[in-house]
Amino acid sequence: MDECYIGRLPEELILHILEHLDSLPPSQLKIRHEPNLSLTESGDTPYKAVSCVSRSLRRLTLPLLFRHSRLRLDQPLKHSWTKCLICNAGGLDFRLNTGKTPPVVHGIDQYHVNVLNDVATLLEESKEQKDAIANFADASPVERQASQLRENFLDWSPRFYHGLKDFVDFSAFHNLSSSVQSYVISTDKMLSKKLDRFPHLAAIDRDIRYRCSVEFWTHLLSVANSLQRVTILAPPIDLACLTNCAIDTFGDWAFGDMDFHVLTVSFPLTNSVQPSTQSNADQSVDYTALDPLPHRYPGLAPHSILNLRPWHSIQINEGAFLKAYGTYEYFERGPPSLIYSIKDSLAPRPIYSAHAQRISAVPLQNLRSFTYTGIFPFANHLDFRELLPQLEELDLQLAPEPGSNILQEPARVGKAQMEDLWSELITVYQHVAALLGTFHITARNVPRLKKFVCRDSKIANLQEELDEVFVPLCLPVWAEYEVGVFSRLKGGIDEVEEYRNISWAD
């Protein structure tokens, strides 16, 4: 009998077969695991294996292989990147010594050149300031600030720009831009020490990463319009940089086991998008007008990734809070978290011009789903009052996932008291139940929330206590259709007309 070879089949049939090898990316499958850098890795790579069989199968498989793409931002600088005079030490010194921009290789985007020129200008101003005060004051702070800016630029500008450009050039060459549905960026700790209690303040004159981040996301989204999902995995302080959010790091020392956070923003799968075939940055985007800095704490930068698209869903995994329970009056400290800036953006304080015209946009106005995962977060950290009026779905997991041994590891538990851990968890759900389990509905103010998921209800030892907490949800507005999954009854306002005298928001 003749040997059967899949390559002899029609391409349409081969593609249909290959589709059966597809699976969710690890960043989705592991989204509730305690965050670490392996969260985006997978040992199962069928498309990569198929792409190595032959050129024809590689051509067919590439759009499937890069459907879920990722970039490790803190990878070693590639040799080709170090030759770029726009972001290497030689080019920067040339600009400082001559006042001229180094030769620009064809294909380099103008916004990348602008970063070099602006950094050089800041360094020149620092030198002038140092010379001006050298005779009557200590100039070392100015010198140290300039050194931080220079080091920050040389370390991270090439990684942001060339890391992305390599990807979009490859995608354009192989016509993959319309195939990329999800994109993950991950990094280990980016700086050896934090530059400011509020990291975004250092971005004014020392930390170029905030600007690079805004340009990175703007460039990516301008050439990969098919993106449905973006995931960022990074230490909390670096996540703030990569999302251009303001955070407070005052109490970060207490959260010694909170190495990484994960943020995912996404659209519903039904959203239609228009593909793009270009690789260079969209020339219609004015990169000089991008604002990478939050104007206050808490808050988002006007051109944060959270503001660049009308995201429908946000998922956050903040990992373990265990170490902080061992500190005195632990509940008075909060982690370095994006939560506060996200909640603030849903009830923004408007900014007005001199003519009393509102100039601040309303961010996250399309947000409808919020998923939070953490390992025993403090109850006062999770106040959902700002979120609930806008959400249609709230999904929570606050205990270690099934199969985790974290509570059996003395080094992880530390000085935390078990009763404190479980008490905080129950308190969070009591607060949620108090907000949702209410008769306070009027024809004018029916709650938007349609679904609430408590994944901790599947923990056998918690079921009885959580059942008591959630009893109010089922009278009369909610129904528990499966364990821990509550849906608001679909009936019209007539079903709750008798309660019309009291506002849901009371």
Image (cartoon, grey):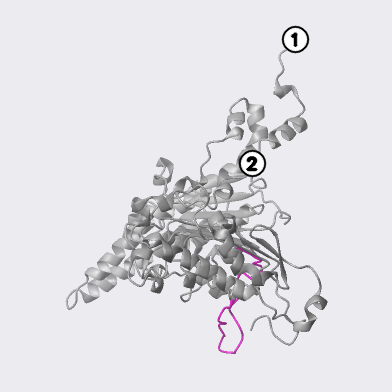
Is 221 displayed left or right of 99 in the figure? right
The answer to whether residue 114 is seen in the rendering is: no
At 55% from the left and 55% from the top, the residue drawn is 459
Please tell me how many numbered marks the rendered image carries: 2
The tag on residue 1 is 1
Where is 314 relative to 32, above or below? below
Q: How far apart are marks 2 and 1 (CA)?
A: 34 Å
* Place of residue 245 in the rendered image (x, y in percent of width and height, measured from the top left): 49, 67
What amino acid is at disc 1?
A: Met
Among numbered discs 2 and 1, the one appearing first in the sequence: 1
User: Closest to the observer: 263 or 502?
Assistant: 502
Is 59 displayed left or right of 325 in the figure? right
User: Closest to the observer: 475 or 316?
Assistant: 475
* Place of residue 257 in the rendered image (x, y in percent of width and height, measured from the top left): 38, 57
User: Closest to the observer: 362 or 331?
Assistant: 331
Q: Does 48 lie within the magenta span?
A: no
User: Closest to the observer: 221 or 297?
Assistant: 297
What amino acid is at disc 2?
A: Ser
**Quadrant in the picture for the C terminus:** bottom right
At 61% from the left and 38% from the top, the residue drawn is 65
At 48% from the left and 73% from the top, the residue drawn is 380
Q: What stretch is highlighted in magenta?
A: 347-370
